[in-house]
Amino acid sequence: MEKQKLIAQGKAKSMYETDMAKTLLMEFRDDASAFDGKKISALNNKGKVNNQFNAFILNKLEEEGIETHFIKTISNNESLVKRLDMFPIECVVRNRATGSLCRRLGVEDGLILEPPLFEFFLKNDQLGDPLINENHILSFKWANQEEIDAMKSMTFKVNQILRQLFDQANLILVDYKLEFGKFENKILLGDEFTPDGCRLWDKDTLEKLDKDRFRQDLGDVIESYQEVANRLGIQINLD
Ligand code: ADP
Ligand code: CDP
């Protein structure tokens, strides 16, 4: 496999074409960002930890019947994925209120949401990833109804699978963001699932073990991601 042209350099990952058709190399870098790129930093080992964390979770989701773009890891901080035509949309499920939901609606931090709350956001840093609804998606033709329904039902199914997985590791899956894309007319889960894109609280102490440690300057960011990995039984190789 040959790494070829860089096609996208995001805030945390770089996507390269390869000599294999419809296959991208996804490189997890050590860069961390928050607040739509306004706060940036480099965190040692973040790329390696997140690549291996993501591989474990996406494999788990595949085992449970969620189709994803993930093919395999090829180094400690790189994986091969199917090249998707991404929807410019972020799908968020919340089991507890925190973050932007509390700022927007003034609700109590940590409030349990039953049923879990689903929200769509537009993926657009310049606009601060605004909250949107299905009507925006349909009118601006970002996706059709069938695609919306598929993204929503896959995002909820991920909740069922991962809530249980994290619960067994004494963690609360507070909320998370997923991105989807199309591959040969099928909708696949793309991008990543790591502590960068979800919130995980210790069940007993409610200690934050996710990117809020970076957002809120709590320290030990990558150590906390590794703690989560340890509890899930993920062996992280930092060579
Ligand atoms: P951001 O765009 O939020 O800064 P990243 O640094 O994570 O994010 O960059 C990864 C980029 O690659 C994102 O724009 C994401 O939507 C896109 N992407 C993720 N998976 C795939 C895929 N399988 N095919 C094509 N693009 C993808
Ligand atoms: O992070 P913030 O408080 O601004 O946003 P949120 O809407 O409360 O985020 C909900 C969940 O989606 C959190 O787990 C975020 O980490 C994740 N998210 C993300 O990964 N990328 C974004 N652009 C926005 C949210």
Image (cartoon, rainbow, N blue to C red):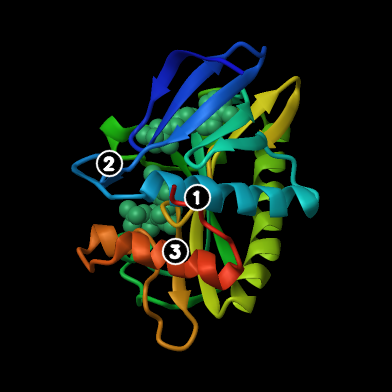
Question: For mark 1, what is the residue?
Answer: 177
Q: Is mark 1 within 8 Å of ligand 2?
A: yes
Name the amino acid type tagged 1.
Answer: Lys
Question: For mark 2, what is the residue?
Answer: 36
Name the amino acid type tagged 2.
Answer: Asp
Q: Position of residue 235 (x, y in %)?
A: 57, 60
Q: Tell which residue pokes out farthest to the bottom in this image.
A: 204
Name the amino acid type tagged 3.
Answer: Gln
Secondary structure state at the residue bearing disc 2: loop
Q: Position of residue 210 (x, y in %)?
A: 39, 63
Determine which of the numbered discs, if any, sits on residue 95 in the image: none
Q: Nearer the viewer, mark 2 or mark 3?
A: 3
Q: Is mark 2 within 8 Å of ligand 2?
A: yes
Q: Position of residue 233 (x, y in %)?
A: 61, 67
Please, is residue 197 above or below residue 225 in the view? above
Determine which of the numbered discs, if any, sits on residue 226 in the image: 3
Please, is residue 75 above or below residue 163 in the view? above
Q: Image quadrant of residue 225? A: bottom left
- Which corner quadrant holds the N terminus? top right
Nearer to me, 58 or 76: 76
Please, is residue 7 above or below residue 100 in the view? above
Mark 2 residue crowding within 10 angstroms, few (<14) / some (14–19) / many (20+): some
Nearer to me, 205 or 130: 205
Q: Is residue 21 left or right of residue 217?
A: right
Residue at x 44% of width, y 74% of height: 201
Secondary structure state at the residue bearing disc 1: strand
